[in-house]
Image (spheres, rainbow, N blue to C red):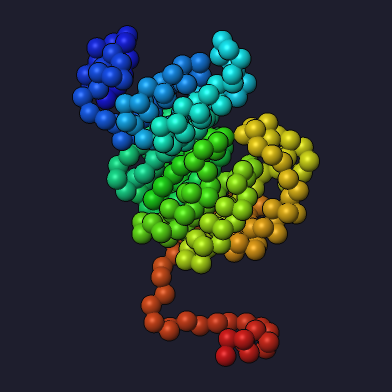
Amino acid sequence: MPVTPKYTAVMGVLAYPNIEALPIKPDLAIICTSAQKVPSIVERLAQFGCKVAIIMASGMALQTDEHGNDLLTLTKQYAKRYGMRLLKPNSLGMILPPIGLNASLAHAGAISGKIAFVSQSAAICTTVLDWANNKGIGFSSFISLGDATDIDFDELLDYLGRDSKTSAIMLYIDSINEKRHFLSAARAAARNKPIFVIKSGRSHEGMKAAMLHTGGIGGNDAVYEAAFRRAGMLRVNDLIELFAAVESLAHSTTLKGERLIIMSNGGVLCGFGG
């Protein structure tokens, strides 16, 4: 249901002049406007009864309204007041191939599969999407978190860990906001499914770049490394390793029965096998 005061139809679909003119309450809103308009749109959507919205606009924390309030804080206040959840800001959106949903600005869709990919970087999303489509690899969920100032990794890990359509989870992380919640959710999900994570900011310069990208709080890379290991996640060092992990998971088959052979040139390893 397109909403715009400028046109009567968008791509042949009847448009509505404002949110209040919509015939039904939307399950999901995709806000594709400039940052200045986002707070008022979120408030009206929330009052109308919409519970989830994706915000594509960037730079909201750096812009203010006429009263000096930054747009990001104002948007969060409106959403929290009415119990609305936001995937934002600076989000590419999300693609859920199993149900045919493409609520994103991505230039291409995703094939349906069993791997979930969650990223704070829109550029990484498009890179992975191009590579996966070229290889014929599909996804159960493909989600761009953006700055992750509301919906974050911990809640998505809780959901994906229980999702029957997902057999493995891939994460691209710039920074983590709710660290305790993240570790708890990751530990629970990793008991049932493999979780691979690539963390930007390994060097000091890279950490500063990651902080500028998402506005998150930087941290010592060794601390992140230890946390990932404790939670049972496997860290990959770069996109090449990430692609290799995705391809391995996509083409792997579940073992049936006990027909497994272990080959080793070390007696100790063979002893473990026994």
Q: Residue furthest right?
A: 204
Q: How many circles with numbers are drawn on the protein?
A: 0
Q: Is residue 31 above or below residue 117?
A: above
Which quadrant: the N terminus? top left
Is residue 209 or residue 39 the one in the foreground? 39
Is residue 218 or residue 264 the one in the foreground? 218
Q: What is the quadrant of residue 203 in the picture?
A: top right
* Residue plotted at (38% across, 77% down): 256
Q: Is residue 186 above or below residue 98?
A: below
Which quadrant: the C terminus? bottom right
On the picture, is 132 further left or further right than 219? left
Q: Residue furthest front?
A: 81
Is residue 141 or residue 177 the one in the foreground? 177
In the image, residue 99 lies at what x, y percent? 29, 45
Q: In this orientation, does residue 108 appear?
A: no
Is residue 101 or residue 239 the one in the foreground? 101
On the picture, is 222 further left or further right than 45? right
* Residue plotted at (71% across, 41% down): 218
On the picture, is 199 further left or further right than 7? right
Q: What is the quadrant of residue 51 in the picture?
A: top left
* Residue plotted at (50% across, 26% down): 75
In the image, residue 209 lies at what x, y percent? 70, 34
Q: Is residue 134 above or below residue 70?
A: below
Q: Is residue 86 above or below residue 62?
A: below
In the image, residue 226 lies at what x, y percent? 70, 59
In the image, residue 92 lies at what x, y percent? 47, 33
Q: In this orientation, does residue 267 appear?
A: yes
